[in-house]
Image (cartoon, rainbow, N blue to C red):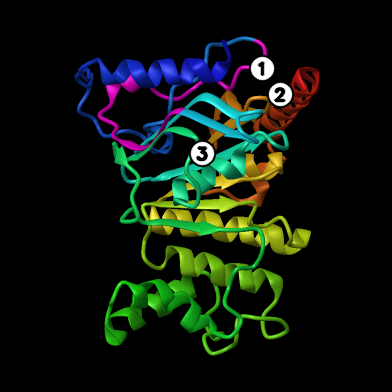
Amino acid sequence: MGLFDDYITNVKSHKKTEPQAAESSAPPSETAKEQASAPPAAKPGKSSPVSGGVNFNNSHLTDILELKNIHQTYDDGNVTIFKDLYFLLEDKPEQGQFVCILGTSGCGKSTLLRYICGLQDPTSGEVLIHGKPRTHDNRVGMVFQQYSSLPWYTVYQNVELSLRFQGMSKNDRRDIVLKTIELVGLKGHEDKYAQYPSLSGGQLQRVAIARSIVARPEILVMDEPFGALDIKTRLQMQELLGKIWHETKTTILFVTHDISEAVFLGDDIFVMKSNPGEFVYYHHVKLPLERTRELKRSDYFNKLVYEIEDEMMEMDSLSKKNQ
């Protein structure tokens, strides 16, 4: 049984148990607030996540996203990507979710995001949002690695696009669009076209993020959005995304191959293997929710990076044996 199975066992158990009364009515400490509603840690042992988090039996958490009995095959069933895959995310009140997904190449990370966005249906299984089958009415934003802005539109026109499709009036959407543009650090660039050389690569990705969050989606999925950026811009975008998360308190699923990036951004990290794709390890990151680059120099940060690195190398070896 993998460590992810312990996570799922704890999640399922709280569905069958009435919440326990709090032992004290005193307000929680700041540290407790930062760690509140964290999924339970896996059992201690080799490569186990850092201990911490709270027991789901003590909470009234509601489901945000659930993937049940997911099968994905190609080539008339000869190639299997997922077999009986299960995944569940629950709400963290007043905080939102920032979940990072790491995994070996070909394990199906991007495929999971396409399910959530409605860009692909699994061969079989259910994709549930708030306990109901996913529909086009669910507000899910997506940011790709490739710059996806419309180059014949200005920054302002790109960002307002989803609000126009919703039928919001020009006057009503203007204030929302301008605030969102300011949030992603593009104030003063509203009338520039979303293309080179008017905007840099980092600025173009900011446009894509602004366009995805302007309508306040229930879920925002991001598929290696910083993969094509230079290191300086990438670090800046990491800090910006953390700021946006605290502002919007949405649920973010973030796929990356960069372990350090996952530990810096994620409140929770799930690690996948391939052949077939499944979740094997889970870590709750016990760092302050508001993070600075100085945290990357801490012993805890580097210990967790090395721990996940070892898990990734182990899974890569197992995947090659199963091929």
Q: Are marks 1 and 2 in contact (CB under 8 Å)?
A: yes
Residue kind at label 2, given as amino acid type:
Glu
Residue kind at label 3, given as amino acid type:
Asp
Q: Which residue is mark 1?
A: 47
Which residue lies at the image location 59% right of the left edge and 38% below the top edge?
A: 101
Where residue 312 appears, as percent x and y from the top left, is 73, 28
Q: What is the CA distance from the residue labelled 2 to the residue labelled 3? A: 18 Å
Q: Nearer the viewer, mark 2 or mark 3?
A: 2
Residue kind at label 1, given as amino acid type:
Ser
Where residue 281 appears, as percent x and y from the top left, is 59, 23
Q: Which residue is mark 2?
A: 311
Is residue 55 visible in the rendered image? The answer is no
Q: Residues within 10 Å of mark 3 (few under 14, many from 20)?
A: many
Q: What is the CA distance from the residue labelled 1 to the residue labelled 3? A: 18 Å
Q: Are marks 2 and 3 in contact (CB under 8 Å)?
A: no
Q: Residues within 10 Å of mark 1 (few under 14, many from 20)?
A: some
Q: Nearer the viewer, residue 61 or 55?
A: 61
Magenta stretch, residue numbers = 46-69
